[in-house]
Image: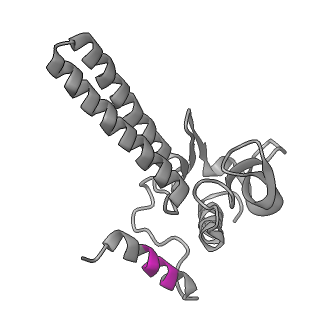
Amino acid sequence: MPLTFLTADRGTDARAADADDIALPFDDHDQWRRPYRPGPWRVGAAALLLLLASFVMIAAMIIAAAGAMSGAGVCLALGLVIIALSLRMLRAGVWVSRHGLRRVGFFGTSTLAWSRVTRVQTVQRPVRWLGLPRTVQGQALQLVRAGRDEPVELITDHNADFLSRETAFERAADTVEAWASEYGQTH
């Protein structure tokens, strides 16, 4: 059985190697999209959360069959919260469109119009390993906003999307830089 969602990324790899390929391969630039696939660490953590949610939902069904509806309601609510958390974890990352750049985090989302972006660049610096306090030497894609000197870190090569995937990080960083040069003040 062909897994088309896996082969689509290989097609992107083949196109990225082509020198004549455009940097912004999407037809509809008004739609928000992530310029990379979620990494295995992020997908694995979300899968574990969904597995936990299924056990909690089964427990809610068993508790409801036993007649304790208040306990079943609590388990059902907990299962729905776990599902929402796993979906939020999968949605986290950098999203781009013609309108700007959107950083979706676990607890919040911020959108910045391309007109307010001064520079997007990849730099070598200490980065956090999987978002934990431990830092390692790595690369980070940074954004500099108009009127501010302090850069904002968008993605790193050691976060949940790019750990042990250097070429995927480079491709994603190049794609975000291409969107910035196309629609931002950098051109």
In the rendered image, the residue lying farthest to the front is 66
Which region of the structure is painted magenta? 9-14
Q: How many marks?
A: 0
Does residue 32 appear to the left or right of 60 in the view shown?
A: right
Q: Is residue 170 visible?
A: yes
- Residue at 45 percent of width and 79 percent of height: 10
x and y percentages locating residue 20 in the rendered image: 54, 88
- Give the main secondary structure, helix, strand or loop, of the magenta stretch: helix
Does residue 142 appear to the left or right of 21 in the view shown?
A: right
Does residue 8 appear to the left or right of 39 in the view shown?
A: left
Q: Is residue 178 above or below residue 57?
A: below
* Residue 88 falls within the magenta-colored stretch: no
- Looking at the picture, tell me which residue is in the foreground, 12 or 143: 12
- Residue at 36 percent of width and 69 percent of height: 5
- Looking at the picture, tell me which residue is in the foreground, 107 or 60: 60
x and y percentages locating residue 103 in the rendered image: 58, 45
- Residue at 40 percent of width and 62 percent of height: 28
* Viewport quadrant of the C terminus: bottom right
- Looking at the picture, tell me which residue is in the foreground, 131 or 115: 131
Q: Is residue 127 above or below residue 7?
A: above
x and y percentages locating residue 95 in the rendered image: 52, 52
Colour scheme of the picture: one colour
Q: Is residue 115 above or below residue 26?
A: above
Does residue 164 appear to the left or right of 49 in the view shown?
A: right
* Residue 74 figure quarter: top left
x and y percentages locating residue 69 in the rendered image: 21, 13
Q: Is residue 39 visible?
A: no
- Residue at 49 percent of width and 48 percent of height: 45
* Viewport quadrant of the N terminus: bottom left
